[in-house]
Image (cartoon, rainbow, N blue to C red):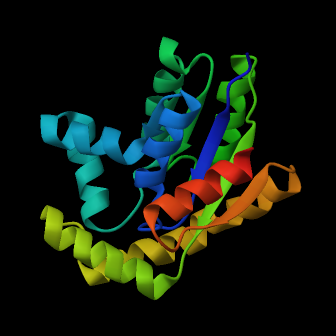
């Protein structure tokens, strides 16, 4: 059976992490989140984690060469052989090219790219609430707004790339979590 090889795009705070976990369970594929991998490395005090922390604290993306190597290694693990859901990667045109190369070398290709769309002001409020609830020092309003700017500059153009390839599906990320999950499931059916 061919499993789904999916990218979940959307601005920070659009609900990608929540929806990735729910979708991965429904689709029986691993959710692969660069953010989670970075945070784990920060928590473990690894060299990668220390480097990633500097960029994350400034609201910037971790450099492509670090991220690409990490994603390639993760996609090579056995649980991703039959499918996966990428959350937070690719974020740049260069990463799209790298992902294409990684998948081509494995004889695989993407099946879907889903963009969760979200209202900027609501996203800022979501992230500020999350920062307070979870004690996330990297989610101040200025850093959140910078992350949204970086997303618009670097990641939003990927929507055009995947749209031209006929892989893109846009789903409204606003509303109750269960409603968004149902919209995603319908879009992928």
Q: Residue 55 appears at what percent x and percent y?
A: 31, 58
159 with respect to 145 (left or right): right
Query: Residue at the spot x=73%, y=35% of the render?
Result: 110
Q: Above or below — where is 171 with respect to 2?
A: below
| Place of residue 7 in the rendered image (x, y in percent of width and height, measured from the top left) | 62, 45
Q: Residue 157: image x %, image y %?
A: 70, 66
Is 85 displayed left or right of 115 in the figure? Answer: left
Front-most of residues 61 and 74: 74
Inspect this view and state whether residue 67 appears. yes
- The extreme bottom residue here reads 121
Front residue of this view, candidates 30 and 72: 30
Name the quarter where the N terminus is drawn. Answer: top right
Kindly identify the residue that appears in the image at 67 percent across and 45 percent down.
Answer: 96
Q: Is residue 21 above or below residue 150?
A: above
Q: Is residue 170 left or right of residue 11?
A: right
Residue 2 sits in which quadrant? top right
Residue 45 seen in the current view: no
Residue drawn at x 30%, y 83% is 142
| Residue drawn at the location 77% of the way across and 55% of the way down | 168
Say which of 104 and 131 sits in front: 131
Image quarter where the C terminus lies is top right
In the rendered image of this protein, does residue 167 appear above or below residue 55? above
How many circles with numbers are drawn on the protein?
Answer: 0
């Amino acid at each position: 059976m061919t499993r789904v090889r999916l990218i979940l795009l959307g601005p920070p705070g659009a609900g990608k992490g929540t929806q990735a976990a729910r979708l991965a369970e429904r689709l029986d594929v691993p959710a692969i989140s660069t953010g989670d991998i970075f945070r784990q490395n920060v928590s473990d005090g690894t060299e990668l984690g220390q480097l990633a922390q500097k960029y994350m604290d400034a609201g910037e993306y971790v450099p492509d060469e670090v991220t690409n190597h990490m994603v390639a290694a993760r996609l090579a693990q056995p649980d991703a052989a039959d499918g996966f859901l990428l959350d937070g990667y690719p974020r740049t045109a260069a990463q799209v090219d790298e992902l294409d190369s990684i998948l081509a070398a494995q004889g695989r290709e993407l099946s879907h790219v889903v963009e969760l769309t979200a209202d900027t002001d609501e996203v800022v409020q979501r992230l500020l609430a999350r920062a307070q609830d979870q004690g996330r020092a990297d989610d101040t309003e200025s850093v959140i707004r910078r992350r949204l700017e970086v997303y618009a500059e670097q990641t939003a153009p990927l929507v055009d790339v995947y749209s031209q390839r006929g892989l893109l599906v846009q789903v409204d990320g606003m509303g109750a979590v269960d409603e968004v999950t149902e919209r995603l499931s319908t879009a992928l059916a």
